[in-house]
Image: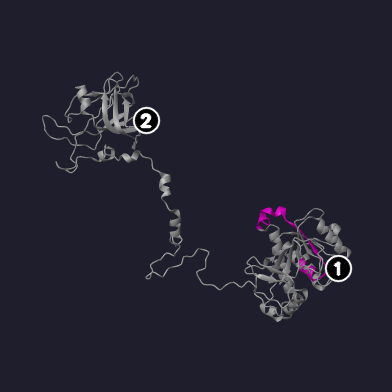
Amino acid sequence: MMSRMATDWLGSVVSIDCGLLLGVYQGEVSSVDHTSQTISLRQPYHNGIKCPVPEVTFSAMDIKDLKFLDIQNTVNPGQGAATEPSSTSAGRHCQKNRNAQPQLTSSSSNPYTGPVTILRKGSSNSKGAVQAVPKKNTLRNGGPGGAMRSKDDECFGNKTDENLDTDFDFEGNLALFDKAAVFSQIDGTSSHGSRTQHHSTKAEQKSLSYRHDENILEVKPVVYRQIRVPQLGGKEYCTDSGLVVPSIPYDLHKRLLAAAEHWGLSFERRMEMTGVCASQMALTLLGGPNRLTPKNIHQRPTVVLLCGPHIQGAQGISCGRHLANHEVDVILFLPSFVKMQELVSSEVNLYSKTSSRQVSSVTDLPSSPVDLVINCLDCHENPLLKEQPWYQQAADWANQNRAPVLSIDPPASDQQQTVKAKWSLSLGLPLPLADTDVRVYLCDIGIPKMVFQKVGISYHSPFGCKFVIPLHPT
């Protein structure tokens, strides 16, 4: 009877729970050996994934639970009717007597009553017998002619696609993807380089595709020479945008400033504009927001301002006042034994209301390097100041301090630059500076466009959204 039971259950689909370590297996029973207490499944699935081997054999000691998912249709000799498949698991109970043999028995609904015993080999910690009652098969479509396959058979049956054993070829599949063609479609062009048509009624009407940085409006070509002067200073510069900025000789520059003052742009207004722009450039050179923050007040930058008793010196003092207002440690050098102009005295008075650090001797200047030196010693009208002892001493100190130098409104190239500057700031339009490694910047001091025309200059502002721009030699 034992061997008959084992033979009749061959082909049944079962689910075997082997615990957390081994997991759950499903498959078709291929053999049951009551002598070795083993059961074998063919076409097994492990935790819902098909196993790479065609058959798996289990020992009774590894089985925690067993369910019959499907029983082959059999005919009871006394009934002559087909059994019905069941979607529910078989009934189970555990006997905790270690000496008792675990038995797998069928219920009265099964046409066979003989038990099939599966013992755990050499198991001293057996948890008892596991009993599973196979259920009758049911007609899926409710009649004798309906399909005889349950949902479990669809999932775990022997008609599963064998291609699941084949690994997916990612590289081969990726090779089928035409990346260039797809991106060509995204860009709005076909593989032949023609524009893609979007809902066009005519074949020759094609819509243009634009990048995010392209202007969809038709624009006129850019005219890079927008400033024309009646008298060229001998050198030309260009902005970052490519606009040409010509230099002008000092005589034309002087007439331009005189015309601006005649039309209401006084020297005081130009000087204040120069001081604001020069201080903004100096703050950027000192580090800007990375250096000048409330949390960095203990490391305030130090700037030495070298000024002469003239208009260029007054512009430098205005710059120093704005720097001191922005928490910069400013030291003003201005010789006291020289008679100063009234404008210079007025600027010194304003500066003293912000900072009291003013020296008249080079010996009072710092001996260690500072953060920045601003040079306003030179004068366009009086080049003989370079022969004065105070000028020479101040220039020597600046060249030996090893700090970078910014020159404000430097003279033209016909005057030799005594102080070696790294940056120079010109006003309105640049003068032809000497051929050195100095980096030239241009400052907008607010001269109206009509004033340029009064002196014969065709002018369009090259500044854009800024008041100080760099100039590059052409």
Residue 22 is labelled as 2
Q: Position of residue 419 (x, y in %)?
A: 81, 62
Q: Which residues are magenta?
A: 289-317
Q: Position of residue 145 (x, y in %)?
A: 15, 42
Judged from the image, the secondary structure of the residue bearing numbered disc 1 is helix
Do we see residue 336 in this rendering? no
Q: Is residue 329 above or below residue 413?
A: above
Q: Is residue 46 above or below residue 307?
A: above
Q: Is residue 102 above or below residue 14?
A: above
Rendered image quadrant of residue 116? top left
Residue 385 is labelled as 1
Which residue shows up at 35% across the image and 34% down it? 52
Circle 2 Cα neighbour tier, 10 Å, few/some/many (<14 / 14–19 / ≥20): few
Rendered image quadrant of residue 54? top left
State left or right for residue 110 relative to residue 308. Answer: left
Magenta region includes residue 300: yes
Tell me, what colour scheme is on the image? one colour
Rendered image quadrant of residue 369? bottom right
State left or right for residue 231 relative to residue 40. Answer: right
Looking at the picture, tell me which residue is in the foreground, 244 or 17: 244
Do we see residue 146 in this rendering? yes
Which residue shows up at 87% across the image and 70% down it? 339
Circle 1 Cα neighbour tier, 10 Å, few/some/many (<14 / 14–19 / ≥20): some
- Quadrant location of the C terminus? bottom right
Q: Position of residue 223 (x, y in %)?
A: 61, 73
Tell me the distance, in whole angstroms, between the alpha carbons under discs 2 and 1.
98 Å
